[in-house]
Amino acid sequence: MGPFEISEAVPSARGASSGLAPDGAKPLSVGEVVLRIKALIERQFPAPIWIEGELSNCSYPTSGHIYFSLVDEQVSDRFGQRLMLPCAFFKGANQHLKYRLEDGIKVLCLGQITTYEGRGQYQLRVLRVEPKGVGALQLAFEQLKKRLKAEGLFEPSRKRPIPSLPQRVGIITSATGSAIHDMVSKLRGHFYVAILPVKVQGEGAAAEIAHALDLANRLRLADVLIVGRGGGSIEDLWAFNEEPVARAIARSAIPVISAVGHQDDWTIADYVADLRASTPTDAAKGLVREREVLFEQSRLLLQQLLDGMRTHLDDQVQQLGTLSARLQLLHPMHQLERMAQRSQELQSQLVYGMRATLSSAEQRLQGLAGRLQALSPLAVLARGYSITLRLPQRRVLTSAEGLGIGDQLETLLAEGRVISTVAQTLPPERTDGHGADA
């Protein structure tokens, strides 16, 4: 028989009462059998071995241990069941595991074949697990990325806008690397810079970075945070792929710029951060460039504002001049001046009209005077005629009839008067149609 084969015992009534087996042999106790199996297994597998298989029945009890089974992908038992090897990955050995063991992952396990005496089972006490076909870090990266994405930590809607004009910039990185010098040299003179030095690789780096993020938020040290480091291998950058850093970035009230490695280096921090910069230097340049762009836009807007104000003022001055001219026209003094001017014009027109009227009247008067002169008795007198008046009534005499001797007469001549007394009256003579003078 082989080392793992046990012959079947045939039941018999004989020996049941004597403490011997039916064949007369002394039976073994359970403990003896288990210890013999343990010894056989340990002799067969004296040193740890690598075993490949597919993970199944993964469990994570509160003790920190991990229990699972390794399943053979190709071989099955006589009942068609796939062969399985129970595995125990104790807490002391799995503390540095970078990824989560899940059903269906194909792995290589390094471990010691041993027995679990309490159940009489053999198992693999796992010392190390490596994903088959893909690196452990890459698998851990993909697992954490998938889980955080499912939680919504990568959603654009939860990302905070980077302030356009931050006054204070916080830098979380190594105090001795080239990244800090590049960023400070670019930011100096533009912003107040707060530096929170941390480990960026190795044991404890992720915890320091997460603590620095929480500290910056608690003390409100900056308006924007740059978290990053220079380039390196995936192992060098791994602190930025760990969950504590991702959680700290996600809960930060201060906007976070992730600047890890080079252009092609993507970390979990890049996905969670509010903005990803390809390098630490680009992160600093981006903030400065945004500031300069805003200053230039402000300068252009200010110039446009000044030009617009000048144009507006020119228009207002022109309108003010127009309104001032109109106001001057409506001013009482101007109105008085206009009225005085109008009064002078009317006075001149009146004087001119009066003069014209007087001149016309004078001409008419002269014409009438001439005609009146022609009809005036004085004009008749001037031609040698006279007018005789009877005194004292001074009544014009046109006939000698009614005069008596001694009546006094007054004769009007062209020049002077003559007083006479009637000595004799004579009847009129009819010679040329005119009566004789008295």
Image (tube, helix red, strand yellow):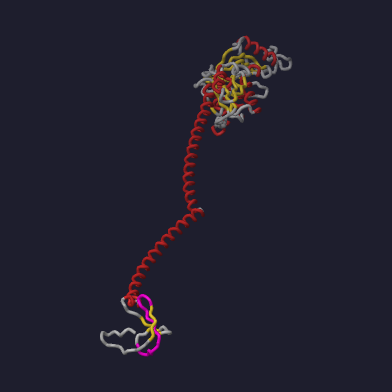
Highlighted magenta segment, given as a residue range: 400-416
Could you tell me which quadrant the N terminus lies in?
top right
Q: Residue furthest left?
A: 431
407 falls in the magenta region: yes
Q: Residue at image x 35%, y 68%?
A: 363
Q: Main secondary structure of the magenta part?
A: loop
Where 386 sits versus 8, above or below? below
Q: Is residue 181 visible?
A: yes
Q: Position of residue 6 (x, y in %)?
A: 62, 14
Looking at this view, is 279 or 85 the one in front?
Answer: 279
- Locate residue 314 relative to residue 361 in the image: left or right: right
Left or right? Give the position of 309 relative to 66: left
Residue at image position (54%, 22%) is 186
Q: Nearer the viewer, residue 151 or 172?
A: 172
Q: Quadrant of residue 136?
A: top right
Along the viewing direction, whichever of 194 and 327 lies nearer the viewer: 327
How many circles with numbers are drawn on the protein? 0
Displayed quadrant of residue 208: top right
Of the 4 image quadrants, the one containing the C terminus is bottom left
Q: Position of residue 303 (x, y in %)?
A: 49, 35
Residues 176 and 140: in front is 176
State whether residue 83 appears in this view: no
Spot occupied by residue 129 in the image (x, y as percentages of width and height): 58, 17
Does 174 sit above or below residue 296? above
Q: Position of residue 164 (x, y in %)?
A: 55, 31
